[in-house]
Image (cartoon, rainbow, N blue to C red):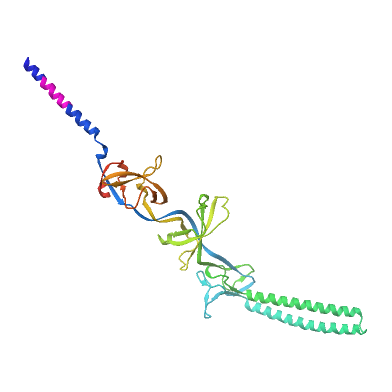
């Protein structure tokens, strides 16, 4: 009986020891603070840099000026040749670069030259007629004053002289018109630019108002873009712009806002913005699709971090994690300029601090961290 009691005693003692050990082990595990768990993270030192507030828009490139050169006189195009420096000539074709005032075509030059000659002869005849009428007027007036001529004959002489004077004025006006037509029979470029279209060939008959060529000024081009009404206060004349076109990949063309239309488009409720830029190398062609970035604000020496490292913001404030002596520390931050994947931090973070850039989603304030490479985290 004593042996059985002794066995029961030792069994109970062992059970109590086991239960005590088991309870102590799990209690220790449960009470172990979470911050003692080490989390691998990747970090980088916070630095300063430049950042820009931008507006992304699209538009089409247009020539600064486009002029349809039309005929002011009718006739046959006897020459469609551009007169070059030195007296040489070149056929008027698309792509020809022309200067302001450069001769492009001639329309029935001899015909209009003959009309000028005929008008000059008309003026000469009218001048002779006027001189004769003036002499007759003076003679009749003298006779009338001497009593040898009637008042009727005097009035006729005066009227004849006035008519002769009027015919001379008409002849001079016809001469002026003939000289204008002679000048207009030689077609010149009204602007410096490139011929973008030829509408008629040499030898054809042409009417007043018919187009001959189209000349475009492409040394300066413009882009018209439509900006949402909410950007009205941010865009001003002189706002810097960067322009990209598909033909030149990532090449950027720098420009600025030239003008802002005073009224909104009634249908789209957008602001029409005109951007002009130099195009001396003629790389940009009218009709090209342009991607425009307007820079409404720029800061230098700003604290800039990747957008993805910033947490929160939907319910609570934005925050990031920094590492101080191997411990993750939560820092609330204020965001300034937002540029694509980069954000400016205006408060809560300073240059030189160690910022967690990977692994921050697994952190809480006070956790022990192990700094590793991104490859190690993956």
Check if residue 18 falls in the magenta segment: yes
Q: Residue at x 71, y 79 (%)?
A: 119
Q: 312 left or right of 3?
A: right
Magenta stretch: dominant secondary structure: helix
Q: Does the rendering let one see residue 378? A: no
Taking the spot 29% from the left edge, 47% from the top edge, the residue there is 323
Residue located 43% across and 59% down the image: 246
Please tell me whether residue 93 belongs to the stretch shown in magenta.
Answer: no
Residue 146: image location, x then y, percent: 92, 85
Number of numbered markers: 0
In the image, residue 257 lies at what x, y percent? 50, 59
Please determine whether, in this image, residue 39 is positioned above or below residue 14. below
Percent x, y for residue 212?
Answer: 58, 69
Q: Which of the 4 quarters of the picture holds residue 6? A: top left
The one nearer the camera, 112 or 165, is 165
Q: Quadrant location of residue 127? A: bottom right
Q: Is residue 364 left or right of residue 25?
A: right
- Compare residues 281 and 310 and report the one nearer the observer: 310
Q: Is residue 202 left or right of residue 358?
A: right
Which quadrant would the N terminus be assigned to in this image?
top left
View extreme (right): residue:
147
Q: Which residue is more in the foreground, 202 or 72?
A: 72
Q: Looking at the image, which is closer to me, 205 or 377?
A: 377
Rendered location of residue 312, percent (x, y): 38, 42
Q: Let me know if residue 317 appears in the view.
A: yes
Point out the residue furthest to the top here: 1
Left or right: 226, with 250 as reference point? right
Q: State the extent of the magenta-drawn residues as a range.
A: 9-19
């Amino acid at each position: 009986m004593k042996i059985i009691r002794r066995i029961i005693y030792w069994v109970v003692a062992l059970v109590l020891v086991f239960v005590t050990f088991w309870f102590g082990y799990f209690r220790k595990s449960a009470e172990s603070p979470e911050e003692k768990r080490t989390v691998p993270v990747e970090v980088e030192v916070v630095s300063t840099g430049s950042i820009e507030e931008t507006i992304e828009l699209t538009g089409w490139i247009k020539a600064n000026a486009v002029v349809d050169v039309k005929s002011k006189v009718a006739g046959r195009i006897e020459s469609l040749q551009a007169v070059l420096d030195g007296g040489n000539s070149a056929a008027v074709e698309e792509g020809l670069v022309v200067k302001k005032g450069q001769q492009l075509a001639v329309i029935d030059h001899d015909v209009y030259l003959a009309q000028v000659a005929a008008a000059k002869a008309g003026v000469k005849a009218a001048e002779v007629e006027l001189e004769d009428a003036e002499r007759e007027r003076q003679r009749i007036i003298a006779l009338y004053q001497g009593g040898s001529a009637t008042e009727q004959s005097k009035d006729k002489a005066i009227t004849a002289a006035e008519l002769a004077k009027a015919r001379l004025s008409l002849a001079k006006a016809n001469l002026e018109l003939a000289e204008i037509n002679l000048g207009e029979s030689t077609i010149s470029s009204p602007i410096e630019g490139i011929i973008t279209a030829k509408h008629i060939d040499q030898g054809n008959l042409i009417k007043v108002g018919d187009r001959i060529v189209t000349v475009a000024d492409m040394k300066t081009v413009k882009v018209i873009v439509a900006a949402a009404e909410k950007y009205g206060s941010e865009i001003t004349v002189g706002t810097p712009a960067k322009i990209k076109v598909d033909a030149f990949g990532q090449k950027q063309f720098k420009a600025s806002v030239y003008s802002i239309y005073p009224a909104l488009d009634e249908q789209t409720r957008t602001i029409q913005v005109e951007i002009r830029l130099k195009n001396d190398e003629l790389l940009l062609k009218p009709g090209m699709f342009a991607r425009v970035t307007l820079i409404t604000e720029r800061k230098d020496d700003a604290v800039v971090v990747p957008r993805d490292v910033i947490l929160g913001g939907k319910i609570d404030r934005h925050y990031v994690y920094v590492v101080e002596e191997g411990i993750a520390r939560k820092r609330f931050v204020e965001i300034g300029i937002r540029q694509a994947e980069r954000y400016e931090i205006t408060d809560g973070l300073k240059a030189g601090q160690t910022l967690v850039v990977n692994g921050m989603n697994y952190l809480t304030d006070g956790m022990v961290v192990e700094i590793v490479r991104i490859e190690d985290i993956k």
